[in-house]
Amino acid sequence: MLASRPRCPRCQAVWALVPGRIAAGEKTLEVRRWYPDLAPSEDLLIVENGRFLHEEGDEDPDGTAVAIVRVKAVRPFVQADMQAACASYFEEGWLAWELSDLRPVTHPVTVRAARGIYQVDFLLPDMIYPLK
């Protein structure tokens, strides 16, 4: 019988080209149209996936865990946020999630990517290191 596995942080799927910038500490804002249901002390696993998840219920079984962060604040996205969000264009009405407490996942871990914030179970022993 297998021992029960501890629950990993809640996961947010993020488009494929951007997670590497989050893991490298270059992207400090995530831009979304909705508020995350997270406390500032909750961990959020950033998942990279190779295709855009267009509709509710879309999933990609071949996602990769790239970093764990916290969302310390959510506020309106403004033009001055473009660089911190690694954004290519600005549009009114979006929200900026301020990312903090970055811990890159240094060894590839395959995990399901899905829309929104969702639970995923897997172990992350000694694969997470604080960014210096």
Image (cartoon, helix red, strand yellow):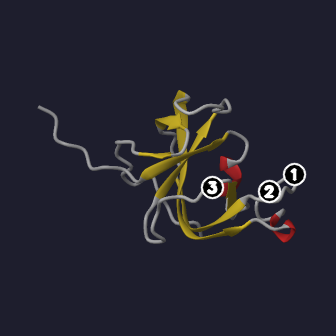
Report the number of numbered marks: 3
Q: Earlier in the sequence, mark 1 or mark 3?
A: 3
Q: Amino acid at mark 3?
A: Ala
Q: Is residue 38 above or below residue 51?
A: below
The reply to whether callout 1 and callout 3 are in contact (CB within 8 Å) is: no
Q: Which residue is mark 1?
A: 88
Task: Give SS at disc 1.
Answer: loop
Decide which of tag 2 and tag 3 comes sooner along the chain: 3
Q: Residue at x 55, y 39 (%)?
A: 115
Q: Which residue is mark 3?
A: 23
Quadrant where the N terminus sits is: top left
The answer to whether the residues at label 1 and label 2 have Cβ atoms under 8 Å apart is no
Q: CA distance from mark 2 to mark 3?
A: 13 Å
- Which numbered disc, 1 or 3, marks the residue closer to the eye? 1
- C-alpha separation, residue under disc 1 versus residue under disc 3: 19 Å
Residue 128 x/y as whole percent: 46, 56
Q: Position of residue 99 (x, y in %)?
A: 61, 66
For mark 2, give the secondary structure: loop
Look at mark 2 in the image and give the residue it sits on: 86
What is the quadrant of the C terminus in the image?
bottom right
Please tell me which residue is depicted at 80% across the width and 56% down the height of the picture. 86
Specify the amino acid type for callout 2: Cys
Of 23 and 99, the residue lying toward us? 99
For mark 3, give the secondary structure: helix
Which residue: 37% across, 50% down? 8
Left or right? Give the position of 49 relative to 76.
left
Residue 71 - label:
none
Q: What x and y, as percent, mark residue 129?
A: 49, 61
Q: CA distance from mark 1 to mark 2?
A: 7 Å
Residue displayed at 73% across by 61% down: 26
Q: Which mark is in front, 2 or 3?
A: 2
Q: Is residue 80 left or right of residue 20?
A: right
